[in-house]
Image: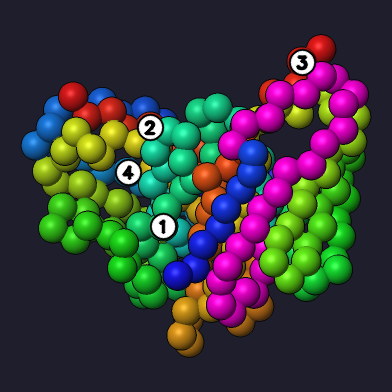
Amino acid sequence: EDQVTQSPEALRLQEGESSSLNCSYTVSGLRGLFWYRQDPGKGPEFLFTLYSAGEEKEKERLKATLTKKESFLHITAPKPEDSATYLCAVHLWVGGSQGNLIFGKGTKLSVKP
Amino acid sequence: EAEVAQSPRYKITEKSQAVAFWCDPISGHATLYWYRQILGQGPELLVQFQDESVVDDSQLPKDRFSAERLKGVDSTLKIQPAELGDSAMYLCASSLGGNLYTEAFFGQGTRLTVV
């Protein structure tokens, strides 16, 4: 069964304390992995797309990496405004159609000043 | 900047009543998704359209939920009758579609409360 698991469920950091979020997946036919940020009461906001093992993407204090079994979202020197839930999703091909996104449950990040 | 538009933002309805949500995707996006998100969980796909055709509705509770995208542009998701367990955030997303997958962009969602 296709599965996406994110850890930890919640992470509390002090401002400036770097850390990493994990997304592990057991899927067949992976076509891409996506990271989203979601603020309370709002829709997910797209951050990164990763397509192949070894690929890396960066945006401000965030860096996403991909291996054959998992992805990491590294947060360097976080600020309180980075507090949000970070969602990982994998794109699968479904027969001849485009496929769909399967999401993990997310990691809720809190950054204290 | 182009956005996915959803309405209403909030909806409170009594159980057994009908409720409908509307989504207008980003112009030119062929693929449209409806997701349901329960508090503390990740979004779960309800239905996916490619233009006006349904390509995946395997998780849509078809006895009470229906979705349409008649002209391949905007879409409506309906629940009739609503049940208490339908309380959730309903998210619409769109992407360019085609053979090479591109990222999906989400709207702000509709928060449904069934009382």
Q: Which residue position is annotated with label 3? A: A112
Q: Which residue position is annotated with label 1? A: B45
Q: Earlier in the sequence, mark 1 or mark 4?
A: 4
The circle on residue B111 is: 2
For marks 1 and 3, give the one nearer the viewer.
Answer: 3
Residue drawn at (28%, 28%), measured in percent from left and top?
A: B113
Q: Chain of mark 1?
A: B
Does the magenta portion include A27? Answer: yes
For marks 2 and 1, give the one nearer the viewer.
Answer: 1
| Front position in the image: A104 or B64 | A104
For the record, the magenta segment spans: A9-33
Amino acid type of the residue tagged 2 in the rendering:
Arg
| Front position in the image: A23 or B20 | A23
Q: Chain of mark 2?
A: B
Q: Which residue position is annotated with label 4? A: B21
For marks 1 and 4, give the one nearer the viewer.
Answer: 1
| SS class, disc 2 | strand
Amino acid type of the residue tagged 4 in the rendering:
Phe
Q: Quadrant of the N terminus of chain A?
A: bottom left
Q: Earlier in the sequence, mark 4 or mark 2?
A: 4
